[in-house]
Amino acid sequence: MMTEQAYSIAQRKLFLNNGVQLAYYDSHPDGGAEDGISKVVVLLHGYCGSSAYWENIVEGLEPYVRVIAPDARGHGRSSAPSDEVYAMEMYADDIAQMLIGLQIHNAVLLGHSLGGYITLAFAEKYSKKLSGFGLIHSTALEDSDAAKENRDKAVAALEQNGIAPFVDGLLPKLFAPDNAEALSQEIERGKQIGYGTSLQGAIGTAKGMKARINRKQVIEQSELPVLLVAGINDKVIPVANVFAATNAVTVKVELADSGHMGMIEQPKEMAAAILEFMKAKE
């Protein structure tokens, strides 16, 4: 039987007011003050992922910033509510309650793929809790008609076959084709992480992503610094879509040897981009 540690690095849990039990990784549970750390970065993973998506970059970040990496509802070690649709706004409320519970009043919020959609929903509703935010292989655009059809196909496949076959088909598509052989172990690791997604979570999230709205204005009208990270070989969200919305203080980063999983395909470069973004705000 697969252990929880196999699909999540979350080592703590919070019970939110909405009934969700949210698991999360915290590099400095004491707050970080004793280590001279005052900045907080919250990392949100992608669809059928978990906090473990960030495991290769946490070590490079935590000497400088407090890293919080939650398992989204329905993923990893977090609970899976019975809601039919996991709306991006619901996810954002989860993060807001988590920050209140941890007494974190200001943070940088960065989201990978699904996590980016959540980040935008959060920035729209809770901007005063942020000192910056960013999209990692994500976009402010809504789903195209073709993408919405694919969400429906994903739901049908999940309902018919379950989570494991779905994840087996999904993970290889997230990596740059040229990296498939060299990163075969990382792809298998990604599958193990994905198996930790609840069936309810996968289905509800697919429906939530389909229903999400265009949030270009959240970036364009924001005065906060925005980080946009794109993979040159991303076959899921192309560079143009990542950079579809910018503001006057947007930082753009392109990862030359990455597909949709830069935190795994180019972890050193990803960590460096995040730290540089955090430092630039000083």
Image (spheres, helix red, strand yellow):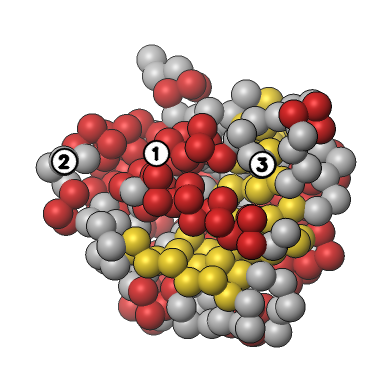
Q: Amino acid at mark 3?
A: Val
Task: Please rate how many residues cluster around mark 2, counting C-alpha atoms within 10 Å: few if below 14, some from 14 to 19, many from 20.
Answer: few
Between disc 2 and disc 3, whose residue precedes? Answer: 3
The residue furthest top is 1
Q: Amino acid at mark 2?
A: Ala
Task: Please rate how many residues cluster around mark 1, counting C-alpha atoms within 10 Å: few if below 14, some from 14 to 19, many from 20.
Answer: many
Left or right side of 33 for 112: left
Please name the residue shown 48% across and 60% down the image.
136
Could you say whether the residue bearing mark 1 is in a helix, strand or loop? helix
Task: Please rate how many residues cluster around mark 3, counting C-alpha atoms within 10 Å: few if below 14, some from 14 to 19, many from 20.
Answer: many
Please name the residue shown 74% across and 38% down the image.
37
Up the image or down, 260 lies above or below 224; here it is: above
Residue linked to disc 3: 65
Between disc 1 and disc 2, whose residue precedes? Answer: 2
- Residue 145: where, in percent of width, then height? 39, 81
- Residue 152: where, in percent of width, then height? 39, 65
Could you say whether the residue bearing mark 2 is in a helix, strand or loop? loop
Image quadrant for the N terminus?
top left
Residue linked to disc 2: 182
Please name the residue shown 56% across and 56% down the image.
276
Q: CB atoms at circles 2 and 3 under 8 Å apart? A: no
Task: Look at discs 1 and 3 and give the one toward the viewer.
Answer: 3
Q: Amino acid at mark 1?
A: Gly
Q: CB atoms at circles 1 and 2 under 8 Å apart? A: no
Q: Is residue 172 visible?
A: yes
Q: How far, Cα to Cα, is label 1 from label 2? A: 20 Å
Q: Is residue 90 visible?
A: no
Q: Nearer the viewer, residue 98 or 35?
A: 35
